[in-house]
Image (tube, helix red, strand yellow):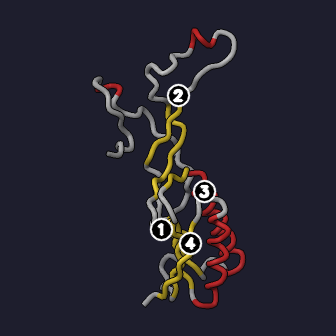
């Protein structure tokens, strides 16, 4: 069984929840011409299960968006981020050096403080979707291939015709 995103299991109710939620860096989930119909749909699909941190998703989105916007223009595409980083990443900070033995608790109460967020991705799940017309199809493939270099693991680019 997979643990729930913001909780931990403890016999003390006060210790059963993550105290804060870190700021997520993803600024926009949809860019480009959001109200237009396009003839092709180009998707970036994961080849395996993994977690992607929110700053990696934002970096890939910016790269993809910049490539599309510079060449095709703002109205020639519609880019959608299909992930949301729900999973909170935690770290149990340990001190090193002189006097560290008097500060650190070791593995006692080791739940950790929130340091970031990640999206849990399954095999075959869509990461990004780009809607374009036929003349910008190769540009969309190029933009998604640049974006996948910013993400961990390997991905495939699929092209579908919208009906």
Residue lying at 44% horizontally and 29% vertically, measured from the top left: 111
Place of residue 134 in the rendered image (x, y in percent of width and height, measured from the top left): 59, 90
Residue 104 placement: quadrant? top right
Which residue is tagged 1? 126
- Does 96 sit above or below residue 28? above
**Position of 13 compared to 47: left or right?**
left
Question: What kind of element bears circle 2?
Answer: loop
Q: Nearer the viewer, residue 121 or 65?
A: 121
Which residue is tagged 4? 156
Residue 152: mark: 3
In the rendered picture of this protein, how many numbered marks are placed on residues?
4
Place of residue 49 in the rendered image (x, y in percent of width and height, measured from the top left): 47, 57
Asked if the residues shown at circle 4 and circle 2 are in contact, with their CB atoms under 8 angstroms apart, the answer is: no
Residue 30 appearing in the image: no
Q: What is the spatial separation of the Cα atoms under label 2 and label 3, in whole angstroms?
A: 24 Å
**Position of 7 compared to 81: left or right?**
left
Question: Which one is in front in this view, the residue at disc 4 or the one at disc 2?
Answer: 4
Question: Which one is in front in this view, the residue at disc 3 or the one at disc 1?
Answer: 3
- Does 122 sit above or below residue 41? above
């Amino acid at each position: 069984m997979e643990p729930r995103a913001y909780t931990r299991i403890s016999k003390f109710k006060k210790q059963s929840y993550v105290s804060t939620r870190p700021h997520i860096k993803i600024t926009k989930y949809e860019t480009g011409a959001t109200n237009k119909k396009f003839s092709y749909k180009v998707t970036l699909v994961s080849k395996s299960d993994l977690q992607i941190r929110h700053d990696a998703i934002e970096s890939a989105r910016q790269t993809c968006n910049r490539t599309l916007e510079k060449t095709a223009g703002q109205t020639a595409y519609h880019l959608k981020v299909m992930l949301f980083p729900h999973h909170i990443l935690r770290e149990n900070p340990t001190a090193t050096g002189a006097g560290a033995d008097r500060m650190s608790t070791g593995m006692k109460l080791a739940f950790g403080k929130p340091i970031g967020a990640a999206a849990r991705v399954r095999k075959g799940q869509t990461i990004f979707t780009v809607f374009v017309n036929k003349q910008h199809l190769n540009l969309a493939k190029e933009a998604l291939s640049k974006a996948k270099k910013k993400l961990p693991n390997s991905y495939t680019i699929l092209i579908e015709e919208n009906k």
